[in-house]
Amino acid sequence: MSEDSTAQSLRPRRSNLAVPGSNPKMLEKAKGLPADQIFMDLEDSVAPIAKADARKNIVAALNEGGYQEKVRVVRVNDLTTQWTYQDVTEIVENAGQNLDCIMLPKVQTAAQVQWLDMTLTQIEKTMGFEQGRIGIEAQIENALGLVNVDEIAQASPRVETIIFGPADFMASINMKSLIVGEQPPGYTEGDAYHYILSRILMAARAYDKQAIDGPYLQIKDVDGYRRVAERSAALGFDGKWVLHPGQVEAANEVYSPRQDDYDHAELILDAYSYFTSAEGGARGAVMLGDEMIDEASRKMALVIAGKGRAAGMQRTKTFTPPES
Ligand code: GLV
Ligand code: MG
């Protein structure tokens, strides 16, 4: 892992808005919502007989434009179906220049990511598109995918995010619950998702990818969404899916630093830079108020400051060097 993470230099994805490709009205409406990412779905939110039309809707929506800074993603069907190759070919050949990433669901092995990587390269060559620009978002939705997540994260330089798919994952491991993201009845101590989230996060951080949490299906319960999102945000996740406009603002807020933390991080960076300089005494461990800061503090501060800057936050405090 490099000292300054490339995952942080990718565009923010605090809110990842899911839109069924079979619904042109929702595709249109999504453009105006303040989500960081919009992903147009060809997979589980689209009925098998509607998939061919959904591909056309998505190509038209991408080429129409109007997404401002949003990351534009299409989720194709997984590689155990008959649809994946046509999804990728039709979308990328016809709208590849207006697309940032392909999301591959239910990824189980690195070979599946490599298939997508090579297919994208072939299409880029055929169409004369820039090679390697289109990224891959790998969704981990079953036990085999989680066991192989380290290889999946390294399978291609195109991989930008590792995403947790809780609904499919719960089914895959026979979890005794139907409420996605909430603790299964009977699990009264701890967090039943902690291992899975941490496993994904370690792979993402080890290989400089963004870690994204999946959907919360009780779409009217924004407090519930917030509570579940706080868990993965606290661990270090970068964002979460949103299935409803009402969840967008909650995601943007939960995955941004709090104002106090952002100000504190910027102060640490300024203070540390001053105190380690010749003018500031060339010191390595110094006091900032009541707190001792050193190189590790700078690294932690860089993460919070990076997230705050990416979210467009403004600082409300400035560092003043002490009078000598
Ligand atoms: C999303 O695809 C999920 O299965 O949770
Ligand atoms: Mg799924």
Image (spheres, helix red, strand yellow):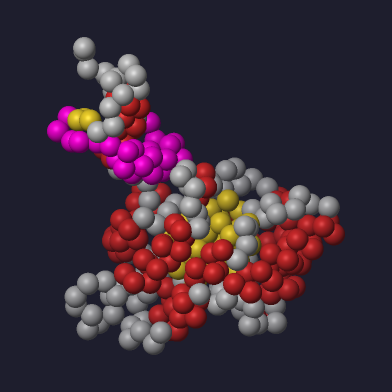
* Between 55 and 96, the one nearer to me in the picture: 96
The residue at the point 66 percent across, 69 percent down is 114
Residue 117 placed where, x, y %?
69, 64
Q: Quadrant of the C terminus?
A: top left
- Image mark count: 0
Residue 140 included in the magenta stretch of the image: no
Horizontal side of residue 241 vs 290, given as left or right = right
Kindly indicate the quadrant of the structure image that contains residue 227. Answer: bottom left
Q: Is residue 222 left or right of residue 161?
A: left
Residue 134 percent location from the top left of the image: 67, 55
Indicate yes or no whether the magenta region holds residue 308. Answer: yes
Which residue, as the protein is rendered here, is positioned at the far top?
324
> Which residue sits at x=32%, y=64%?
228
Residue 276 at x, y percent in the picture: 32, 26
The reply to whether residue 242 is visible in this rendering is no
Name the quadrant containing residue 266: top left
Q: Give whichever of 228, 190 is nearer the camera.
A: 190
| Residue at (57, 43) in percent of width and height | 69
Q: Is residue 121 above or below residue 4?
A: below
Residue at 38% in and 44% down: 303
- In this picture, is 15 found above or below 102? above
- Specify whether 225 is left or right of 67: left
Q: Quadrant of residue 307?
A: top left
Task: Identify the residue at the far left of this view.
Answer: 290
**Residue range corresponding to the magenta coloring:** 289-314
Closer-to-camera residue (247/150): 150
- Magenta stretch secondary structure, dominant: helix
Q: Is residue 109 visible?
A: yes
User: Observer-nearest residue: 61 or 112?
Assistant: 112
